[in-house]
Image (cartoon, rainbow, N blue to C red):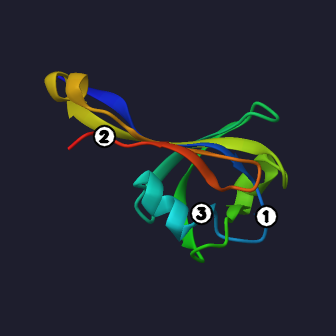
Amino acid sequence: MNVQILKNKIHQARITECELMYEGSLGIDRDLMDAAGIIPYEKLLIVNATNGERLETYAIPEERGSKTFCLNGAAARRGSVGDTITIMTFASLDADTARQFEPTIIILDEKNNIIRRKKPQG
């Protein structure tokens, strides 16, 4: 039996842009994607702590060092610039592997700088 388990998380990110007239997705600074272990075009679950909205989309890389989190397309209606969001990815693992798995988590400050990180051992 496989279970869905948290793989990666970016916590307390601030939305920097919203672009309604775009195909869709969440643009993320490539440095922050790498730090969290998120792969370009990977499926995301986004939780908006400011307004309670939840949505699924995918990650697209933005310019390195930009600190960008841009909601694109219809997703742009689920948040506003300045909103605080959590971005999560999940993996399907067998139950024994899942019990040993540790997600990669980064926590950001109000300017989208990493203030804390938790990476798996090994």
Q: Residue at x 68, y 65 (%)?
A: 68
Q: Amino acid at mark 1?
A: Glu
Q: Report which residue position mark 2 lands on.
A: 120
Residue 51 pos. (x, y %): 82, 34
The reply, left or right, for residue 119 in relation to residue 71 is left
Residue 122 pos. (x, y %): 20, 44
Q: Residues within 10 Å of mark 1 (few under 14, many from 20)?
A: some
The answer to whether mark 2 and mark 3 are in CB contact below 8 A is: no
Q: Report which residue position mark 3 lands on.
A: 28
Q: Report which residue position mark 1 lands on.
A: 17
Inter-mark Cα distance, 2 to 1: 31 Å
Q: Secondary structure at mark 1?
A: strand
Q: Nearer the viewer, mark 2 or mark 3?
A: 2
Q: Residue at x 69, y 42 (%)?
A: 85
Q: Residue at x 71, y 62 (%)?
A: 73
Q: Quadrant of residue 63?
A: bottom right
Q: Secondary structure at mark 3?
A: strand
